[in-house]
Image (tube, rainbow, N blue to C red):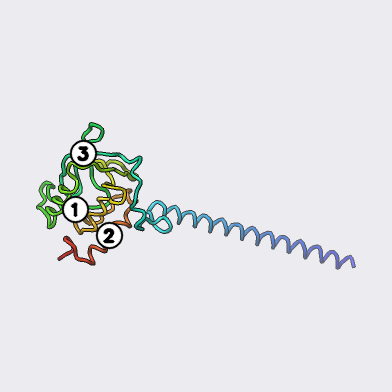
Amino acid sequence: MTIFLNFYMINRNEKREVGGKMKSNKSLAMIVVAIIIVGVLAFQFMNHTGPFKKGTNHETVQDLNGKDKVHVQRVVDGDTFIANQNGKEIKVRLIGVDTPETVKPNTPVQPFGKEASNYSKKTLTNQDVYLEYDKEKQDRYGRTLAYVWISKDRMYNKELVEKGLAREKYFSPNGKYRNVFIEAQNKAKQQKLNIWSK
């Protein structure tokens, strides 16, 4: 009987040790999985993908309160203009889009560059617009980087892409509306509008 009890106790202790190791390994595995999930979500958040993807129509309807109101004085080209902000002159470059060149030194006027520039002149000159910023507010040339809102449901950056007068172009780290622009560009391509007509 004593031998049997001793065998039972030894066997029970061994099971506890094995069980403890299994629980320890299981906990470690769960921690590793949690770290991986957090890493993936952090990457998606930083790059505006996955559950943090920007791209639905309602995301391009904005409350203009809190945004900087400026008065457009002069359009430089399709994606750049000079504005008055509280008595100070600033040069604004639209985020996330790129119109064909018309005034770049040592660069010939590109197809549909004049059309994009003329459209911006007609739409923006002498108008009050609202600036929304992203992670980086200025570029290396000192230009203010912004999403330009004409009204709460009319973002000019997106409008240029929709009309085939600009291409979607991502400049890190500003990508808040990148997927909105990609979607607009795909539609313009399908309809063969302006720069996509050839």
Amino acid residing under circle 2: Ala
Query: Residue shown at 61%/57% (left/top)?
Result: 27
Please say if 150 is above or below 167. above
Q: How many marks?
A: 3
Quarter assignment of residue 193: bottom left
Answer few, some or many: residues within 10 Å of disc 3's Cα (few below 14, many 20 plus, some between 14 and 19). many
What's the amino acid at mark 1?
Thr
Labels 1, 3: front one: 3
- First in sequence, mark 2 or 1: give its number: 1
- Name the residue tied to disc 2: 184
Q: Earlier in the sequence, mark 1 or mark 3?
A: 3
Q: Residue at x 19, y 43 (%)?
A: 81
Q: Are marks 1 and 3 in contact (CB under 8 Å)?
A: no
**Disc number placed over residue 17 in the picture, else none:** none
Q: How many residues crowd around disc 2 within 10 Å: few (fewer than 14), some, or many (20 or more)?
A: many
Mark 2 falls on what kind of element?
Answer: helix
Point out the image quarter for the N terminus: bottom right
**Residues under labels 2 and 3: Cα distance?**
26 Å
**Left or right: residue 63 compared with residue 75:** right
Please give left or right for residue 162 compared with residue 198 in the image: right
Q: Residue 126, position in %: x, y?
A: 18, 41
| Identity, as a three-letter code, of the amino acid under mark 3 | Ala
Q: CA distance from mark 1 to mark 3?
A: 19 Å
Kindly identify which numbered label has been placed on residue 83.
3
- Category of crowding for the residue at label 1, using alpha-carbon neighbours closer than 10 angstroms: few (below 14), some (14–19), many (at least 20): many
Residue 62, x across and y down, in percent: 34, 48
Q: Which residue is mark 1?
A: 99
Helix, strand or loop under label 3: strand
Question: Label 2 to label 1, Cα distance in Å?
Answer: 14 Å
Q: Are marks 2 and 3 in contact (CB under 8 Å)?
A: no
Question: Which quadrant of the view contains residue 137?
Answer: top left
